[in-house]
Amino acid sequence: MSGASFQLALLDAAHDRTTFKSDSDALDRYLWEQVTQDVRRRMAACFVALADGQRIAGYYTLASASLLLADLPASTGRKLPRYPTVPTVRMGRLAVDQAFKGQGLGGALLADALDRAARSEIAAHALMVDAKDEAAAAFYRHHGFIALPDSPRTLFLPLATVLRSRNLPFSAAGETHND
């Protein structure tokens, strides 16, 4: 990441959200206007990558969710119990400030989200995302996500895959990433 160092933290009131500017007006508006309400109501948790300890360079949100067992690819679904739904963690939003584009921060934020979901004591089978467009879907596929057969912009990655590839658990709370 060009030597840039980011601290990952839960969003709090001390973080200045007003200067954040990504390539998506909807993602910017969410951070500026909606995220604190979602956090307060426990609809989502928001994690931020801080540059220089203050500036929000990127963010993502996580929330509990589920997928219908019948919606999963057959190769995945037949390995799971016959419950109607499969517990998941949804990454609702992921955005990087324009000043930090092209430095690998999006991938680092995704890796942190996967690690948090995989380490959680609350059971979930996968991290899922709803990609906003084909470029976002390609980003997730590049990182190993699998598209649902009937919804190609809804993708998931089994957390067992994450655990195997990263030899988790470990503690990432408050750690610094130099990517």
Image (cartoon, rainbow, N blue to C red):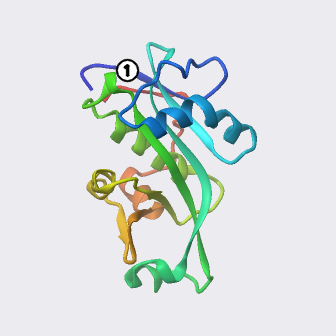
Residue at the location (44% across, 42% down)?
94
Q: Evaluate whether residue 152 shows in this view.
A: yes
Residue at the location (39% across, 31% down)?
22
Extreme-right residue of the structure = 41
> Residue 96 location in percent, x, y?
39, 32
141 vs 67, left or right, is left
> Residue 84 location in percent, x, y?
62, 82
38 vs 165, left or right, is right
Closer to us: 165 or 25: 25
The residue wearing badge 1 is: 5
Q: Evaluate whether residue 79 shows in this view.
A: no
Q: Quadrant of the N terminus?
A: top left
- 29 is higher (above) or lower (below) than 80: above
Which secondary structure, mark 1? Answer: loop
User: Looking at the image, how many numbered discs can be counted on the residues?
Assistant: 1
Residue at the location (57% across, 47% down)?
62
> Residue 109 location in percent, x, y?
42, 39
- 2 is higher (above) or lower (below) than 125: above
The quadrant in which residue 164 appears is bottom left
Q: Residues within 10 Å of mark 1 (few under 14, many from 20)?
A: some
167 vs 13, left or right, is left
Q: Amino acid at mark 1?
A: Ser
Q: Quadrant of the C terminus?
A: top left
- 91 is higher (above) or lower (below) than 95: below
Closer to us: 162 or 59: 59
Residue at the location (54% across, 52% down)?
117
> Residue 136 location in percent, x, y?
33, 51
